[in-house]
Image (spheres, rainbow, N blue to C red):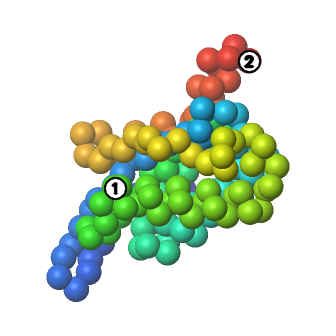
Amino acid sequence: MKPESPRIKRTRHAKHFITYHIVWIPKYRRDILTGKVAERLKEMLKEYSEEIGCEVIALEVMPDHVHVFLQAKPNLSPAQIVNHLKGKTARKLLQEFPELRSKTTHGRLWSRSYFVASVGYITDEIVKHYVETQWERELKRKGQ
């Protein structure tokens, strides 16, 4: 069975199809997003995306970075989405996993920077496949 692709959404006054591929890293790109932290982060990202009306299409948490492919509402800018996701997850992860504080600088979990691309120049299936095969590429890169 083929996974469902994102579809045109509608509000009272608009129809829209806006998807973003967003990537960000922990401060100093440290390998701290593993095990229970990674699993909890995935749950939070889905929850906090829904909270602002976004739908996660694909999601992968690597030890040193995060990929989120989501469909957004037209009234949200990419910066608003990123700020919401990074802000809420940082606060909650540092509360739930106090050991992360010793692996971060001044209690700052995320780097201030991020990458965002609107998906339109390539198909959503290509981006989804890219996100979902992160581990394969990572293992090849490390020669495992």
Q: Decide which of 76, 8 is in the foreground and name it.
A: 76
Which residue type carries mark 1? Pro
Number of marks: 2
**Residue at coordinates 43% horizontally, 42% vertically from top-left?**
114
Q: Which residue is mark 2?
A: 144
Q: Position of residue 17 (x, y in %)?
A: 27, 62
Q: Position of residue 99 (x, y in %)?
A: 82, 49
Q: Quadrant of residue 123?
A: top left
* Amino acid type indicated by mark 2: Gln
Q: Are marks 2 and 1 in contact (CB under 8 Å)?
A: no
- Residue 141 badge: none
Indicate whether 43 appears above or below 68: below
Q: From this view, report whether residue 58 is shown above or below residue 51.
A: above
Q: Residue at x 29, y 39 (%)?
A: 122
- Which residue is at the far top? 143
Query: The N terminus appears in which quarter of the rendering?
Result: bottom right
Q: Mark 2 or mark 1, which has the lower sequence index?
A: 1
Mark 1 secondary-structure assignment: helix
